[in-house]
Image (cartoon, grey):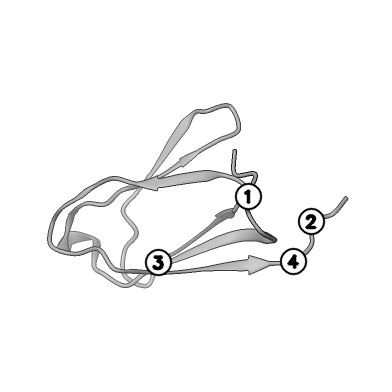
Amino acid sequence: LGENHNGRLFTVIFGLSHKKSYRGGELELIDFFGKTHRLGKIDQNEMIIFPSVLKHRVKTVKKSTRKTLTTWLTGHHPT
């Protein structure tokens, strides 16, 4: 999972939309064993940080618009 992370250590997602303003758009993380963990919607001013080696996905937004700001914390992985 997530072998091509290009020095990204952590993924940071910051919510810009109120979670009640859109339908769908739930965040899911997939762990190293392939199990899906449903984190739900990211609310406005809420931040989620997770290791960039984990795969993630967002369920389809069915109504309105889901806005987020995404960035990464980068560096060298410890050996």
The earlier-in-sequence mark between 2 and 3 is 3
> Disc 1 designates what residue?
4
Image-based side of 8 in relation to 39, left or right: right
**Mark 4 burial class by Cα count in 10 Å: few <14, some 14-19, many 20+:** few
Q: What whole-number distance in Å separates the C-alpha atoms at marks 2 and 3?
A: 27 Å
Q: Nearer the viewer, residue 9 or 39?
A: 9
The earlier-in-sequence mark between 4 and 1 is 1
Q: What whole-number distance in Å separates the C-alpha atoms at marks 1 and 2?
A: 13 Å
Asked whether the residues under the numbered discs 4 and 1 touch, taking CB atoms below 8 Å apart as contact, a structural biologist would say no
**Mark 3 burial class by Cα count in 10 Å: few <14, some 14-19, many 20+:** some
Is residue 39 placed above or below 14 in the rendered structure? above
> Disc 2 designates what residue?
77
* Circle nearer the viewer, 2 or 3: 2
* Circle nearer the viewer, 3 or 1: 1
Taking the view exactly as shown, the residue that stands out farthest to the right is: 79
- Spot occupied by residue 51 in the image (x, y as percentages of width and height): 61, 52
Query: Considering the numbered disc 4 on the image, is that residue within a helix, a strand or a loop?
Result: loop
- Please give the label number shown on residue 75: 4
